[in-house]
Amino acid sequence: MASRIRMEPDDEWNRQLIDNVHPAAWQNPLPSGRYNLVVLGAGTGGLITALIASSLGARVALIERHLMGGDCLNVGCVPSKSMIRGAQIIHEAREAARFGMPGSLEDLGDFGEVMRRMREIRARISHEDSAERYRDEFGIDIYLGDASFAGEGRVEVGDRLLEYSKAVIATGARAAAPPIEGLALAGYLDNETVFGLTERPRRLAVIGAGPIGCELAQTFRRLGSKVHVLERMDQILTREDPDAAKIVQDAMTREGVEMVFECGIDRVERRGAERVIHLTCPAYGERELVVDEILVGAGRAPNVEGLGLESVGVAYDQTRGVEVDDHLRTTNKRIFSVGDVCMTWKFTHAADAAAKIVVQNSLFAVGPIGRKRVSDLIMPWCTYTEPEIAHVGLYERDAREQGVEIDTYQVSIAEANRAVTDGQEEGLVKVHVKKGGDEIVGATVVAAHAGDLVTQFTMAIQNKIGLGSFTNVIYPYPTQGEAIKRAAGAYTRTRLTPLVKGLFERWLSFQR
């Protein structure tokens, strides 16, 4: 299933986007000879795989059936973060009185202008992923159309037949709605259609309190919608550290997002322009929730249909996607896969990192020597609510399950004076180290810029830098990064045992 973007015909930014990522007048090159690598899908994983392979001298064909740039550019990271930023500015304007500036709690901002800016930014960035750039700058043959394997070593694209030495499946994933009676008939939004809105929905129900659901729920609330989050569990962001998720949950609740936990959605119906959601919840029994729009923020399905995977012996599953080993090789030794279609980590940066593995393993590795492994990656991630919540490595529950004994050091982000001066005191830094030492095995950060701060822990784990070493790092004052140094200080203070302290005191007494 291709991504769906609702286009306004008179919108110059949508026209520019399409001209860059799927030009109507594009002429596919005539194939000649055999390709070292054929890549199916031009999202992040496919683009980076093709770019690196071509830069190293490989002859590469890149096939895309819809829009170059995939979800990240068109219906994911770029539009969502642009929209989130607009909502942040409007929220800050309403909060301006705290900082001595005039502000109005009634100011809902200009929803249409926020969405227009989002489309402008998407169009500007789209050149980076454009068909023209990848052809002219990197020498990659670009084919726009549906692709499918046509037997060993061959891929069909329309009426073209491409031969390859190796192939990479990078077709990504799409939004998948839960099986709720009446939902499809009533109509709903997902991450592939929500960015086509030009008018603010007055009442919005968000199904699912995962990262997408939370980010957009807070954003729409800040833009003036009345928002209800429907979650079958008892908290938001259930995969995250409970203490960290609670901070974000409390922030969203204070801003007016209604949280409906442990609820079952019995059915959905449409009454005129309204959607009526029938709920059953332990707290108050049956309830009807009337909204103008429903946003599904839970569920992804891999794009594996129509690829002819059976013809080349590639095993796959409709839920988990293409089956790969730790080297990202499929059950066909000549075919690899990367990105959301096969990986547990469904992040743009994960696809980027995995693409480097795919190029080395598909084109340059000989036997087991030199093969790169996905399991060796140290993968951070971030949810872009306010405050942000970011994590890398093990959670406490992971450590328990794996039998890893840990010590945990936690400080409030408010211990960093910059967080206080900026009015961003909600948050924490929580670090897990192996018991009795300072080897970092996991870290969670909740802060205004947690995604930036967690990178320090990612580098520390990658390079085996202990928590104690952060006490020697000089942070500019004032910065929120000082909270990391304070967590390190909490660790070093545990090293000062009564015996050691007593020895220091005796030594210093002789210096008087």
Image (spheres, rainbow, N blue to C red):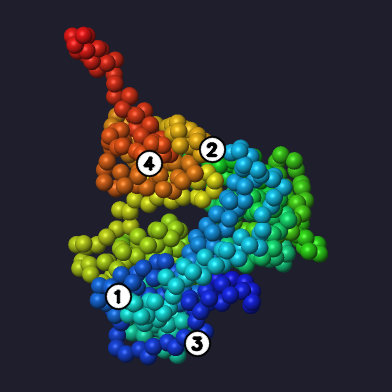
Q: Do the residues labelled 3 and 2 touch (CB within 8 Å)?
A: no
Q: How far apart are marks 4 and 3 (CA)?
A: 50 Å
Q: Distance between the residues labelled 4 and 1?
A: 36 Å
The residue positioned 75% from the left and 43% from the top of the image is: 285
> Where is the C terminus found, in terms of image quarters?
top left
Residue 76, relative to residue 40: is it above or below?
above
Q: Is residue 189 visible?
A: no
On residue 54, the disc is: 1
| Residue at image mark 4 | 442
Give the amino acid at mark 4: Gly
Q: Which of marks 2 and 1 is nearer the N terminus?
A: 1
Cα distance in 3D space between marks 1 and 3: 25 Å
Number of the front mark, 2 or 1? 2
* Cα separation between marks 2 and 4: 27 Å
The spot of residue 423 in percent (x, y) is: 54, 37
Give the Cα distance between marks 3 and 2.
52 Å
Q: Tell me the quadrant of the picture where the N terminus can be found.
A: bottom right
| Secondary structure of residue under mark 1 | helix
Contact flag, marks 2 and 1 (Cβ < 8 Å): no
Q: How many marks?
A: 4
